[in-house]
Image (cartoon, helix red, strand yellow):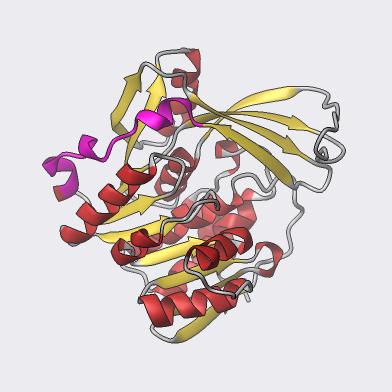
């Protein structure tokens, strides 16, 4: 079972002709309220990819809280570890341009109340993988990683969002997943001059003993593990919205590892899931299901 310790948000999404520059106002025609948050997205992605998943998180005691959990409930994610707290439900404000690219501002809200201590012995005992992101309190994310490692769980971390990465996390992580921006942030935190995601991934594997995946958008993904590099290129797809592509990759990748697949197979499944997520708008509504991932995996390069 995958235990996800992370954020739950409601996404307010608008489509614009272009992402505004600092100080600029750009008009969108309308907006949607869609369940999101990296923890919630990755929990749903892992569940839709076939894993048994439990989420530890927090929402507010407001109307957004129920909406933020709706697709997770429908997706059979165990939400008994989600608490309602005296903070507003977290929110993300997302602008999507005509090419499907996005710019996102996140207001943490209830996610600031998330605590590693909410994970009791029974939950630890039923899990084999801990999946982490960085939208929750940093100290509690580190504590959860440390406890999971001590209990013998596999720890998979998506180093998103990019800013302020704590190198102490690396001692408790088995697999790190970064995109181009996150790779640079991790390198800077370690005092490295490397900027190319593949170079950062190679050094993390060689010097920190952390298998590392670098996702490269339309170029696919690279995995460095045990001194060996693997790469998977994505299929050509009509991009509608890239908002949950990274989270879909992470969830499907973790689900494959949790069911015993090799890292190479997990990489292929992650790339397939991320590609499929780009063809539909919205965060959680775009996350693909196992059957669709299965159909696409065989055609990847």
Up-down: is 111 above or below 130?
A: above
Up-down: is 28 above or below 256?
A: above
- Is residue 296 or residue 93 the one in the foreground? 93
Q: Which residues are magenta?
A: 108-124
Up-down: is 241 above or below 233?
A: above
112 drawn magenta: yes
Q: Residue furthest bottom?
A: 227
The part of the image, by quadrant, that contains residue 198 is: bottom right
Q: What x and y, as percent, mark residue 85?
A: 34, 19
Left or right: residue 292 versus residue 7 is: right
Residue in the image at 38% along x and 50% along y? 132
Left or right: residue 243 versus residue 19 is: left
Quadrant location of the C terminus in the rendered image:
bottom right
- Is residue 51 or residue 157 the one in the foreground? 157
Residue in the image at 70% along x and 64% along y? 218
Left or right: residue 262 versus residue 106 is: left
Q: Is residue 118 visible?
A: yes
Residue in the image at 51% along x and 74% along y? 201
Marks counted in the figure total 0
Q: Main secondary structure of the magenta part?
A: helix
Q: Residue furthest top?
A: 62
Q: What x and y, as percent, mark residue 200?
A: 54, 74
Q: Is residue 255 visible?
A: no
Residue in the image at 59% along x and 75% along y? 194
Q: What x and y, as percent, mark residue 157?
A: 40, 57
Q: What x and y, as percent, mark residue 160?
A: 51, 51
204 drawn magenta: no
């Amino acid at each position: 079972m995958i235990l996800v310790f992370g954020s739950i948000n409601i996404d307010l999404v608008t489509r614009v002709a272009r992402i505004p520059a600092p100080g600029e106002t750009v008009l969108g025609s309308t907006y949607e309220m869609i369940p999101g948050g990296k923890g919630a997205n990755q929990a749903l992605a892992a569940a839709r990819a076939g894993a048994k998943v439990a989420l530890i998180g927090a929402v507010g005691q407001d109307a957004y809280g129920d909406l933020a959990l709706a697709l997770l409930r429908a997706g059979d994610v165990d939400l008994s570890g989600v608490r309602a707290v005296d903070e507003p439900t977290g929110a993300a404000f997302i602008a999507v341009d005509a090419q499907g690219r996005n710019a996102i501002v996140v207001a943490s809200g209830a996610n600031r109340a998330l605590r590693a201590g909410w994970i009791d012995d029974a939950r630890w005992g039923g899990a084999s993988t801990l999946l982490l992101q960085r939208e929750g309190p940093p100290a509690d994310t580190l504590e959860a990683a440390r406890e999971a490692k001590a209990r013998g769980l596999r720890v998979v971390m998506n180093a998103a969002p990019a800013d302020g990465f704590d190198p102490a996390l690396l001692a408790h992580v088995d697999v790190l997943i970064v995109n181009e921006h996150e790779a640079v942030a991790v390198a800077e935190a370690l005092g490295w001059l490397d900027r190319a995601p593949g170079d950062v991934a190679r050094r993390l594997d060689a010097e920190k003993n952390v298998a590392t995946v670098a996702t490269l958008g339309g170029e696919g993904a690279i995995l460095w593990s045990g001194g060996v590099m693997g790469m998977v290129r994505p299929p050509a797809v009509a991009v509608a919205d890239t908002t949950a592509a990274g989270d879909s990759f992470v969830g499907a990748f973790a689900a494959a590892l949790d069911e015993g697949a090799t890292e190479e197979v997990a990489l292929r499944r992650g790339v397939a899931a991320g590609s499929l997520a780009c063809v539909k708008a919205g965060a959680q509504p775009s996350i693909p299901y196992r059957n669709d991932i299965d159909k696409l995996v065989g055609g990847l390069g």
